[in-house]
Image (cartoon, rainbow, N blue to C red):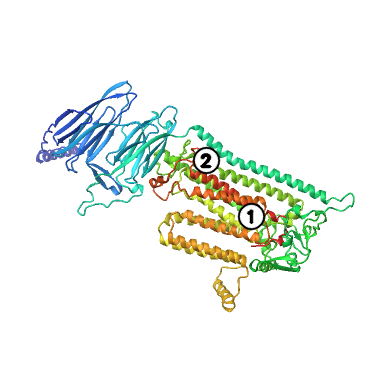
Amino acid sequence: MPGTGAAALAWALLAGTLLLLLPPPPVLPQPQWRNVSETEAQFNTTYTDRVDANLLHIYAFNHSVRRNRTEGVRVSVNVLSDHKDLPVLFVVRQKEAVVSFQVPLILRGLYQRKYAYQEVSRTLCQPQTKAEVETQHFYVDVSTLSLNASYQLRVTRVENFVLRTNERFSFNATAAQPQYFKYEFPEGVDSVIVKVTSAMAFPCSVISIQDILCPVYDLDNNVAFIGMYQTMTKKAAITVQKKDFPSHSFYVVVVVKTEDEACGGALPYYPLSKNASPDEPVDQHNRQKTLEVMVSPAITSEAYVSSVLFCLSIFLSFYILTLLIACWESCRQHKRKGLLSAMDSPSLDTGHSHSIPDSFLGRGYDSYGYGSFGNGSSSSTEGVTDSLGSTEVSYSYVGQEQFKRRTPSAPTRPLSIPMGERSLENVAGRPRLDSLSSVEEDDYDTLADIDYDKNVIRTKKYLCVADLARKDKRVLRKKYQIYFWNIATIAVFYALPVIQLVITYQTVVNVTGNQDICYYNFLCAHPLGNLSAFNNILSNLGYVLLGLLFLLIILQREINYNRALMRNDTHALECGIPKHFGLFYAMGTALMMEGLLSACYHVCPNYTNFQFDTSFMYMIAGLCMLKLYQKRHPDINASAYSAYACLALVIFFSVVGVVFGKGNTAFWIVFSVIHILATLLLSTQLYYMGRWKLDSGILRRILHVLYTDCVRQCSGPMYVDRMVLLVMGNIINWSLAAYGLIVRPNDFASYLLAIGICNLLLYFAFYIIMKLRSGERIKLIPLLCIISTSVVWGFALFFFFQGLSTWQKTPAESREHNRDCILLDFFDDHDIWHFLSSIAMFGSFLVLLTLDDDLDCVQRDKIYVF
């Protein structure tokens, strides 16, 4: 088109005119060729020279390399001129690698702080050779843009560059003068442990294990790029396996960090001078550390097998021992039943049954009214009217005033009368609520007259187990089975994400090589497969095996008890502590879960997953207290929902305390107030047997009680035994609250667990004392369990407080507590704590299970509540 062509021509003419008007481009000066100075240099010679922008110095070195011998070569430089903006560049050209660095060497710290170093030393990477002897050349190029810079250069051979097995070697290192050495696996050694120690904690340093590759990452800003590494103050240890290194050799790299913050040290003031610019590098002068390294063989595969067999043999022996005791008990019971049958059968001569001596039944309660059926006595499952009717028998009180107990003044019949002559009309004539298709606990409590009688009975001055075992046994069975099903549900939902998380942690450690993520005892951490510390996981096997054994023991007891109920055994129906097994099943499950979650925690123990190891410890302590209380208060024990809700609140405070409680005054004030208030509320609940209400009238009722009991007339507590226990409990808990508020311990999780254990021990001691004061006795098996468990707990706590690591400090500071293995060169102190504590917990459960076996032949209205 004519119009379009004309427009294009016009634009072209305009562009040409503009180009003519523009000034010509400047003529660039021709680059000047640098002067090159080449020097045939020698080892162990110091070269002092100058360099500027127009001069390039090249130093040529050569040395012989042997295939079966490795020698290290180290280049040391010192720039004498002070031109921080125009550094001197050193380039080392080798056969397979090029290393370059500038001097002053600028290394960055936290918040991008700059630190300058005038003296720099670097060890050269040694290329491999296939020839028997080969002469290799390398060159050191020195250049700068400065007008004039002076420097010193020295190249030396590194003595003891190849580390020897079980031989210590000392050396010095700085941030700008790192060191690394080579180690070759000897024949027959599959894994070694590299131990590095220092007499001084600071400056902080990094220990790295790297493959035989060039370049070697040996500066603070790149040492974490490859291989395995960990920070260090006084101790460091890394277990290295031959399978991870194809060349069957590796480098041990030691780097001193520019700052100590990673090791728990303080940051230096920056800038140091008043007029210094924040961007100006700081000269740290001589930041040097003396270290000692030793490589020793780790354990063999045979040690793994023997340790696993040792662990299994310990805990499987409990199964064998339990089986032998069960067989012995079964034989004893059969023999006892046979003798009872023989005594109950009519004599051929007289036609009368023989009498059974009381000593055979092993009961010495006659003086206290135990082991006898009074003519007007009631059973635990009789109606309210029957139980109240038993009060027609006159009683007298003996013993000290605060521990009064009753004995029937009327003569009693021994329990050992033949069962065939025993009238079971009351038992057979009772309504059988078991036959109902659906029984709920509220069906019993909502009756007005029963509720009234319940209020009356629970305020009696002297309560018997029969008074607190009035609810239908099927109702209570369902109530306490919820404990087991709830904890089983919690365990599944808790364990699955935990397992997934710790597997991720272990994967991150293996991929990144950062061994500061996990707080192991590195001096006794034996890897297996992808696991870094298999021994810490294996030692938790005892919790699982002994928890399973306890569940089997409970199952066997429950089967025997159900069989006794099926044949209407009067002892099972009316005698002894009411048998409820739901809490025992929950305790056994909690013990197994403690083993599983403790093993998960020890896959990678650190600050973020500590609660895995402690959550079920809180649950075990809480369940043991509930079980101990349930023994003589079966009708008024806490429900599973409220119990687990309280335990969840405890775990919540544990997490909050660890995360926010360190040095936080506000948190400790709030926690101490909550602790004291919870203690007071629980004390009120226990003292009044649940017959009180927390509502708007609580303050008015408290003032009324204080006025009537303290002001109007000074009267002592109605329930002396309960008051003694609760006063002691409040003193201990208030003291623990004051201790926490004043001292503010760093390990809040252990502090919270100590509160639970102290309360459990207090209640258990009170239970034992009151049991003995009430004329009851402790049979041989529970007595042996108490003694042996106490001894085992003592040894277990000794090993627990050894403190081989702590995530409350930095990883480097934690490693200062690391210790060597003490058992089979495989298990450390914490592993022995796992062994002993699992046995002690199992023994404690057995104590709770068998403690009241002496009451199996005692009627429930003769068993006192305390």
* Residue 302 locus on image (x, y percent): 51, 32
Q: Residue 538 has which mark?
A: 2
For badge 2, the amino acid type reads Leu
- Neighbor class of circle 2 (other Cα within 10 Å; few <14, some 14-19, many 20+) is many
Q: Nearer the viewer, residue 75 or 474?
A: 75
Viewport quadrant of the N terminus: top left
Q: Nearer the viewer, residue 596 or 310?
A: 310
Decide: is 96 above or below 508: above
Q: Which residue is farthest top?
A: 132
Residue 581 visible? The answer is no
Q: CA distance from mark 1 to mark 2?
A: 33 Å
Describe residue 267's horizontal placement relative to residue 864 as left or right: left
Which comes sooner in the sequence, label 1 or label 2? Answer: 1
Describe residue 62's horizontal placement relative to residue 386 as left or right: left
* Residue 742 locus on image (x, y percent): 43, 62
Disc 1: which residue: 480
